Every structure is written in C-alpha cells, then in structure tokens.
Image (cartoon, grey):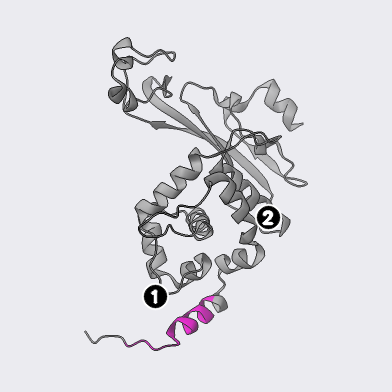
Amino acid sequence: MAEIQTGFFTHDIQLRRIDELGDPLKAIGEAVDFNLFRPLLDRLLGPRSTGPGRPPWDRLLMFRILVLQLVRGLSDEKLEFELIDSASAQRFAGLSPHDAVPDSRTVWLFRDKLAKSRLPGEDGVEGTDGVAALFEVFRRELAAKGLLCREGRTVDAMIVEVPRQQQVKAGEVPAAWKAKPRKLARKDLDARWMVKRGRNHYGYKNSIVGGNTDSFIHGYVVSPANAHDSKIVPECFFEPAGEGSANHGDSAYCNKTIAGRLE
C-alpha cells in the first residue's frame, strides 16, 4: 500500500472541513471562557510542584481534556486515542498534532486528585468535591449561552459493586483489621450491603440526573448502596427546567417529599 503524503497545511484543511460539517466542540470552546476555571483549579489543587523532573501538565489543559471526555462519553483509554487521532479533539484541548498528549493514567490521576479535593467554608458548596464544583461552573456557562436544552431531566441510580467485605456491617471495623494498618488501608469501609430483586449487592449507589434532550449529566451523588433512592436525589433535579418541561424517575422516587418539592 502506498504511503499517504501529508503537507504542511493538511491539518488546517482538515479543521476547515470539520467546521463545514459542524463541530460541537468548537461551539463549546468558543462559548465558554475556560480561563474562568484556572483560579478555581489553583484553589482546589494548591501550589504547583516546582521540584526536579518533568514539569506537570497544565491544569487548564487537563480540565479541558476532562470536558472532552464528558462531552464525547469516552473511557480514559479511548480519550488518549482521541487526543492522538482527532483534529477536533486536539483543537478543543489546545494541542497541536505535534504535541505530546497525557496518557490514560495521567488523566485518571488528575481526575482522582480533583475528586479528593474540596471547597470548604463557602455557602452552598462546603464539602463539594473538585470535579463537581468545576462542572457546576461549566454547566452554568453552557446554560447561560443557550447550549443546554432544558426540556426536562431524568433521575436514576445504579449499583456499583466493589470487592465484598463480609465483616463490614453497619459501619463497624473488626478489631483484627485495626491492629493491621496496612490491611485496613486495603479495605473499603464505606460500601454497604443491599438486596435488589433477591440478589445481594455490596458497594455504592450512583444517582445521576441527565438531560432528556442534551444528554448532559447535570448532577450526581455517590452514596452507600443501602441508601434509598428517594433520599439522595441530586439537588439540580429540582431546578426549574423551562415551561412545559418534565422530570422523570421510577417508582423509587414517588413519595410526598419529592412531589412537594417538584410542585
């Protein structure tokens, strides 16, 4: 097979063709001022490392990559491929075809560090993790620019199982584990047991509010598996979504408290 020759302007020609076909990433990139997120990123992550070795990836670049992952629904591995393969993805992230790109492990570590960060001491966001805080600002920016179709939302939950700990019930920790800190560090003490359709599950419950037309995750709550769905509905489920909009949930969400708040 003959090798395909590419010229100096091939990338620009490719981007122009992508724009002619319509690139939703370009619309988001032009509508949202991502510089708004740098002060918040610095607050969440603290001073940048200045030690020896390779300098860390730019935080704003990494956040744009997380947004790309959200918009296109990519796993960490597919995200890495997309950053290497897709001209549209490269432009959105602020990369050129010749730039190095973060690998999937780097993306995972950055997201994990953000998820463990907190914004304490502020009304309405105390205890909010970094990922939730950043994407709430991002969601508001999109809504303000009319890029979210607020025609209703659906709330639902799914069980995420983790390795089972038979001894962990109701929060107690066996004395034998406490005497072995290294063993204790490998145990998941926050997960809980629940029974669903006659099957035992051990883990967590992810409750998510998704837009009915924009396919955007507007909010989420992670809780132990035994928490009842109706007790952990994300707050954004109760925000006004426009005239004639609808809120959907299964029978687990049918109680007087939720009905009252929706009214």
Looking at the rendered structure, the kind of residue marked 2 is Glu
- Magenta residues? 5-18
Q: Is residue 158 above or below residue 180?
A: below
Whether residue 232 is visible here, answered yes or no, is yes
Q: Which residue is mark 1?
A: 98
Task: State the residue at coordinates (41%, 59%).
Answer: 55
In the depicted structure, whether residue 22 falls above or below residue 50? below
Q: Nearer the viewer, residue 193 or 84?
A: 84
Mark 1, mark 2: which one is toward the viewer?
A: 1
Residue at image x 67%, y 45%?
152
> Dividing the picture into quarters, in which one does residue 219 lie?
top right
Q: Where in the figure is residue 221, as x and y percent of width and height?
A: 55, 34
Left or right: 69 with respect to 134? Answer: left
Residue 149: horizontal and vertical position, in percent?
Answer: 67, 54
**Camera-nearest residue between 215 and 85:** 85
The answer to whether 9 is drawn above or below residue 98 in the figure is below
Counting from the top left corner in percent of width and height, residue 100 is at 38, 68
Residue kind at label 1, given as amino acid type: His
Query: What is the spatial separation of the Cα atoms under label 1 and label 2, in whole angstroms?
Result: 31 Å
Dividing the image into 4 quarters, which one contains the N terminus?
bottom left
Single out the residue that lies furthest toward the front.
Answer: 51
Crowding near the residue tagged with mark 1, few <14, some 14–19, many ≥20 C-alpha atoms within 10 Å? few
